[in-house]
Image (cartoon, grey):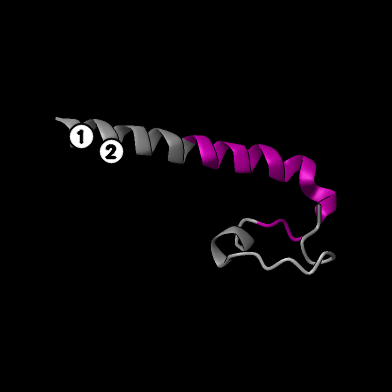
Amino acid sequence: MVPELLNIEVPETLSSEKPVSYVSMRQHLPEAFEKHEERKKEDEQNMQYEDD
């Protein structure tokens, strides 16, 4: 889905992760997934520190 074509506003935090070209999605998706997994691990670590 291309938000610009549907006139959907995208928050700045998400638009910074948007690929320059949707043709490159094959490359972008693994990178985005990797970033998501890193953030998820960091969040889990932060939760563990808060519980201690």
Q: Position of residue 41 (x, y in %)?
A: 40, 33
Separation of disc 1 and disc 2 at Cα? 5 Å
Occupied quadrant, residue 29 = top right
Foreground residue, 52 or 25? 52
Left or right: 14 as drawn, with respect to 20: left
- Specify the amino acid type for callout 1: Tyr
As drawn, 34 above or below 15: above
Disc 1: which residue: 49
Is disc 1 placed on a helix, strand or loop? helix
Pointer 1: residues within 10 angstroms few (<14), some, or many (20+)?
Answer: few
12 lies left or right of 50: right
User: Was residue 52 drawn as part of the magenta stretch in this picture?
Assistant: no
Quarter location, residue 49: top left
Left-right relation of 28 to 5: left
Q: Residue at x 73, y 66 (%)?
A: 8
Give the residue number, with chain letter if any, for mark 2.
Answer: 46
* Magenta stretch: helix, strand or loop mostly: helix
Is 46 on the left or on the right of 52, as rendered?
A: right
Number of numbered labels in the structure image:
2
Say if mark 1 contacts mark 2, CB within 8 Å. Answer: yes
Q: Which residues are magenta?
A: 18-37
At a point 82% along the width and 64% down the height, the residue shown is: 6
Q: Position of residue 14 (x, y in %)?
A: 59, 58
* SS for callout 2: helix
Furthest residue in direction left, as rendered: 52
Residue ID at (68%, 57%): 18
